[in-house]
Image (spheres, coloured by chain):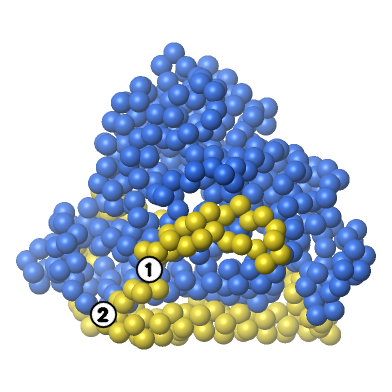
Amino acid sequence: MIDRRTLFGATAATTSFLGSLFGSRKSNAAASAAKPASSFAEADLQPRGQIGRLERLPTQHLEGQHDFITGFRVFANRDMTRAARLRISEIMLEKGKTPIDNLPIEEILEDIGDDPVIANSARLWLSAQQVNWRTLYEEFHGKEDAYLAEMEAADNAGPGTLELNPDMDIPDYTAHEIHIQPGGYVGDPFAGHIYHYGTNNFYTGRNDQDEMHISYANAVPLPEDGTVRRVLDQGCSTGQLTCALAERFPDADVWGIDVGGPMVRYAHMRAVDIGIEAHFAQRLAEDSKFPDNHFDIVTNNIMFHEVSVEAAKDIIQESFRVLRPGGVFYPMDFYTGNHAPTAVYSKYRQWWDSRWNCEPWRLDYAKWDFDGFNQAMRDAGFDVNPEGPPSRRGSRHNTMGTKPA
Amino acid sequence: MTKEYGYTSKSGRKTYTHDFFKSDTDQAVFLGNPLMDDMMTTLVALGAEVWASRRRVRIIELLMEKKGAVTKDMVEAYVPTDEEEAELRAERDAFIKIAYGHMAREMEDRTALNSDAFEGPRGSRSAARGDEPASSDM
């Protein structure tokens, strides 16, 4: 670990930087043991150390801001949402309808009009989202060179590997500022840093140690013959599920692929940092470049609602191609275990989430729904079990596909 | 929606970025006047600043109790114990309730309606209809 104050303080100078290169190291014993001597070990920025597998945010102030955002998200999701639900119920009754009617979004928007309670519920949620990203953006861009140097040093470090394809054609559908994250997944060099910490407060502290991703990895069903030599995580973002899969299947080659170069770069750096052997590549889920019949398991987490339906169909077909006979396809997303909600408030929330939280494909995904998704899996050739094991607490099922032997 | 260029680093280091479509959420007007929307975001940002400062003061106080003297390095490095973290969390939530709670309470106070009468207790009918909890919206 390099002392951040040495790197960033007012008196920071190259000589002091070099002098501190071999200073104190992080206390994570497991990670230290696994990490090979490399240029990354020297450039690793951990100004406030690490708790378990979570590298602490670089300043106490930023940690405090994100502690606030964590609490504010709970308030917005609970108290403000309840107020908005109440108001929508009131409006629907006034209009002779009920809150559980399945209405077109255009009708819902007309009924709601400019009601201030409902509007403010969405406003506050989005404001918190904007503050969330902005604070992280300022931190990482404020010390841009040091953070870029840290990633550079990790690019060729192990365990695991990183493949970047800067000349790859990036489909337009992926190049949006999903969740209004600045630059989205492809346009900002710190997309991974920002996404990781921004989602940590979204998960309200319940995923600081990747607990949720570990539970998702543990939910993935095995092929019938039990053989797992190769596993693919599509749309892996910061690699938390990929790492959890690598831990569950220590003897397998585990790959994470994502369209975002900065995403897989961060994912690889983090895997190196915590000593997990996983392979990351900047590739498209619908054009993965892997050989036919290569993987025993293909999975993904909250990816499908961020891609167009056309791309989703291509991804499902590609998953079929790269799976070996008997291999298992296990997608985990909102409606891979049940149907999209149709109640008035839920539809309204989906709408503003899509329109203003920049989830451009989410409404199409909801319309496609559980049945459309399963049909696309059948069309690709899978034997589909819509009542596969659940991936989420509270869900009874999650669909799964098996490539016929 | 406009397309913006991928990021070029000031130092010339590779960024592996690509052109992207900029969202127009900065232009969203929910409250009838863009200044009102901006002020709401400012209020949230100020809340984060106030709480970060209050939290820092509490950490300084905790360190003073434990160590007698406090340095900036000690404050930066400090990790609250589980018990202290729970106290801080309660204090934070109380602060949020005081600063913003009225915006939610106002609705509850002025209507006799109870959403449970229409949609069932949280997680019952909505879950049966495949309604994801609100918190699943990233």
Q: Amino acid at mark 2?
A: Pro
Residue B8: name its quadrant: bottom right
For this orientation, the residue located farthest to the left is: A96
Q: Position of residue B33 (x, y in %)?
A: 30, 84
At a point 41% along the width and 50% down the height, the residue shown is: A172
Q: Which mark is residue A235?
A: none
Relative vertical location of residue A396 with respect to residue B70 in this rendering, above or below? above
Q: In the image, B114: left or right of A331?
A: left
Question: Helix, strand or loop at disc 2?
Answer: helix
At a point 35% along the width and 45% down the height, the residue shown is: A308
Dot 2 and dot 1 residues touching (CB under 8 Å): no
Relative vertical location of residue A227 with respect to residue A101 in this rendering, above or below? above
Label 2 in the same subunit as label 1: no
Task: Look at mark 1 in the image and give the residue it sits on.
Answer: B24
The chain whose colour is blue is A
At a point 57% along the width and 82% down the height, the residue shown is: B49
At a point 74% along the width and 49% down the height, the residue shown is: A154
* Residue B118 shows in this picture: yes
Q: Position of residue B78 (x, y in %)?
A: 75, 72
Q: Amino acid at mark 1?
A: Asp
Q: In the image, A344: left or right of A57?
A: left
Chain letter, disc 1 residue: B
